[in-house]
Image: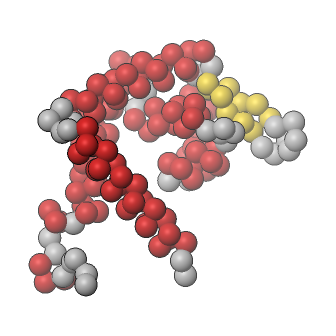
Amino acid sequence: MSFYDPDDYTPERSVGYVIKVCNQIGVAALDRAFAAEGLNASQWSALMGIHHHIEPTCAVLARDMAHDKGAMTRMMDTLEARGWVERTRSADDRRVVHLSLTVDGQAVMKRCRDLVVAYWNRCLADWSDAEIEQFLAHLQKLRGTMEDIATCP
């Protein structure tokens, strides 16, 4: 049996719509919080992606952040110009350019990470740890289903 019925489908009961609105609210709040550091939520996400990937490249970040490769390259140009990111050609394949955070890039990423942690702790202040863990598990389940469906013919 399906949960949704076209006759009573509304935005406020749409999983996609509610997730989109929550994301928009969160991005706007983080953009304001990051303004003093001179970056936005997308740039911070890229810094976090570089920090957490084993071998980060523009292509990997573009895929993970749903950006096109050209936009990601331009973002890396900006972050490199600010002294937060370094590019290094792969010794194995000169076409591959690895990304890493500079000392300054690590510092700004960590300062902004602390702002993100504080923001989410405020948002989830009246949730129990069990509710948060269950919510995350449900989101991960949804993500997995969506990834599976996206790769099916």
Residue 77: x %, y % from top left: 61, 33
Q: Is residue 3 left or right of residue 72?
A: left
Q: Residue furthest left?
A: 8
* Residue 59 seen from this side: yes
How many numbered discs, if any? 0
Residue 47: x %, y % from top left: 53, 31
Q: Is residue 93 left or right of residue 76?
A: right
Residue 147: x %, y % from top left: 49, 65
Q: Residue at x 54, y 37 (%)?
A: 49
The quarter of the image holding the C terminus is bottom right
Q: Residue furthest front?
A: 130
* Residue 24 seen from this side: no
Q: Nearer the viewer, residue 145 or 89?
A: 145
What colour scheme was applied to this rendering of the protein?
Answer: secondary structure
Eyeballing the image, is 11 above or below 50? below
Eyeballing the image, is 58 above or below 12? above
Q: Is residue 86 left or right of residue 71?
A: right
Q: Residue furthest right?
A: 92
Eyeballing the image, is 70 above or below 36? below
The quarter of the image holding the N terminus is bottom left
Eyeballing the image, is 92 above or below 1? above
Q: Residue at x 16, y 66 (%)?
A: 13
Q: Residue at x 35, y 18 (%)?
A: 36
Q: Quadrant of residue 72?
A: top right
Q: Nearer the viewer, residue 97 or 130?
A: 130
Q: Residue at x 37, y 22 (%)?
A: 114
Residue 22: x %, y % from top left: 25, 48
Q: Nearer the viewer, residue 47 or 128?
A: 128
Q: Quadrant of residue 4?
A: bottom left
